[in-house]
Amino acid sequence: MNLVDCKTALKTLKSGLPIIFPTDTLPAIGCLPKFSNIIYEFKKRDRNKPLILMGSEHIHLIDYVHESAKEDYENIASKYWPGALTIVIPASEKHTINLTSNDLTIGLRIPNSYMTRSLLRETGPLLTSSANISGFKGSITAEGIALEFPSLKILGPIPWGKSSGKASTIIFWKKSGDWRLIREGEVLVRELY
C-alpha cells in the first residue's frame, strides 16, 4: 500500500495524479482541478457525471459560487458544514474552466473529517468522487481501496477514523431562497421543508 502524508500527497497531486483519502461519508479520490480528467480515467466514470469540489472551509470555496447565489451559499454552508452535505450551485464565471458539469453548476462540500480538512488546507480545493470503480460498490477501508487502485497513493495514517459509509445529502440551488433535494442522505436541510 502506498501511504503518504499531506506534504507528499501535495507533490503527487501537483504531478497530475489523484490520491485516495477518507471523508466522513465515503472514501474519496481527489485531484487538483486542472487535472480532473484523471479521475474519470481511474474510475472508468462517465464524463457527463460531474465531480465535487471539496475544501477545508466554506470561505475557500466561495470564489467558485456565482454572485447571484452567494448569500444563500453562505447561509447553508455556515449551518451545515463541515458535514455530509453537497451543495450544487451556479458556478462563478471565473471558474467555469474547471467545471465538470455541462450546466455551469458546481457541487461543493466541506467534509467533517479532521484528516481530510488538514489535507485540503495543504492542497487547496480538490475535485473529488467516491473512491470506487463506477457502477461498483467500493470498499470503505484503505486496505480494500488499495486493491482496487493499487497504483494510487493513499493518505495515512491508517486505520482511518470512522465514516458513515453513506453518500452525502445533495441539494440544488434553484433561485434565491429556493433549494431542491437531489439525493437524501444523513443531513436533513430544514430550508427544504
Image: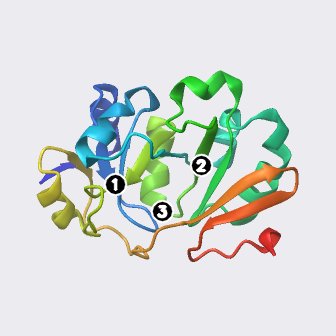
- Point out which mark residue 21 bears: 1
Residue nearest the viewer, comparing 143 with 192: 192
Label 3, label 2: how far apart the Cα atoms are: 15 Å
Q: Can residue 4 be seen from the camera position used here? A: no
Identify the element where label 2 is drawn: strand
Identify the element where label 3 is drawn: loop
Q: Is residue 141 above or below residue 32?
A: below
Q: What residue would you read off at disc 2?
A: 108
The residue under the point 30% across, 28% down is 16
The residue under the point 19% across, 45% down is 152
Looking at the image, residue 136 sits to the left or right of residue 22; the answer is left
For the N terminus, the quadrant is: bottom left
The residue under the point 27% across, 33% down is 17
Amino acid bearing label 1: Phe
- Point out which mark residue 113 bears: 3
User: How many neighbours does mark 2 have within 10 angstroms: few (below 14), some (14-19), or many (20 or more)?
Assistant: many
User: How many neighbours does mark 3 have within 10 angstroms: few (below 14), some (14-19), or many (20 or more)?
Assistant: many
Residue nearest the viewer, comparing 162 with 36: 36
Residue 165 in percent (x, y) is at: 39, 74
Colouring scheme applied when the structure was drawn: rainbow
Looking at the image, residue 106 sits to the left or right of residue 42; the answer is right
Label 1, label 3: how far apart the Cα atoms are: 10 Å
Disc 1, disc 3: CB below 8 Å?
Answer: no
Label 1, label 2: how far apart the Cα atoms are: 17 Å
Residue 156 in percent (x, y) is at: 27, 55
Q: Is residue 98 above or below residue 170?
A: above
Q: Earlier in the sequence, mark 1 or mark 3?
A: 1
Q: Earlier in the sequence, mark 3 or mark 2?
A: 2
Looking at the image, residue 77 sits to the left or right of residue 115; the answer is right
- Point out which mark residue 125 bears: none
| Quadrant position of residue 131 | bottom left
For the C terminus, the quadrant is: bottom right
